[in-house]
Amino acid sequence: MKQTTTENPQLRHLQTLAKLMDNQFRIPGTDFRFGIDAIIGLIPGVGDLTTFGISGFMLFIMAKNGASGFVLARMILNVLIDTIVGSIPLFGDLFDFAYKSNTKNVRLMQEHYLQGRHRGGAWKVVVPVMLLFLVICAGVLWLVYKLLALVYHLFQ
């Protein structure tokens, strides 16, 4: 018998978290929705790292619940796009309001469950990619630190 994502409490919580991160708020008079991902992302460096951590947690739960390596690779790509482009000053902040990686990932997991292919694990894909992702984030933070230090010394 196929289990749906709504029957799994952990995945139901992920649906709620994805809505909070990507679609919780609506601009009155429009259909445009955004979540706390876009708001937290306004904090330089720390905001992007925080939203990356939340997205990484969501990926971990999806992997634990049997997402295949292929589906997880697509999810990781969504998170990478969101984090890397979202870390670009100004443009990245606007991008965060439109690109909803958590919602896309929950939708991918729902489709995966509906197809009944959620029995495998994906640790061989997830661990190396997440480690690479952490290295990239650390590099971005180091570059931001160096840039801020340079600006500070220029105006001192």
Image (cartoon, rainbow, N blue to C red):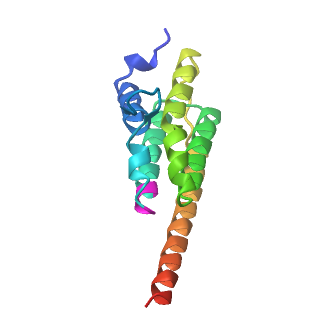
Q: Nearer the viewer, residue 57 or 124?
A: 57
Point out the residue furthest to the top here. Answer: 1
Q: Please provide percent x and percent y for residue 8.
A: 38, 21
Q: Nearer the viewer, residue 97 or 3?
A: 97
* Res 119 seen here: no
Point out the residue furthest to the bottom here. Answer: 156
Image: 149 above or below 28: below
Residue 108 on the magenta segment: no
Point out the residue furthest to the front here. Answer: 29
User: Is residue 69 left or right of 9 when viewed as pictured?
Assistant: right
Q: Identify the residue at image location x=53%, y=48%.
A: 94
Q: Identify the residue at image location x=47%, y=46%.
A: 56
Q: Nearer the viewer, residue 27 or 21?
A: 27
Q: Identify the residue at image location x=63%, y=40%.
A: 73
Magenta part mainly helix, strand or loop?
helix
Image: 7 above or below 63: above
User: Is residue 148 left or right of 78 when viewed as pictured?
Assistant: left
Image: 113 above or below 135: above
User: Is residue 3 left or right of 115 when viewed as pictured?
Assistant: left
Q: Please provide percent x and percent y for residue 137.
A: 53, 61
**The C terminus - image quarter:** bottom left
* Res 44 seen here: yes
Q: Please provide percent x and percent y for residue 70.
A: 65, 34
Identify the magenta region: 44-48
Q: Please provide percent x and percent y for residue 108.
A: 56, 28
Image: 11 above or below 59: above
Image mark count? 0
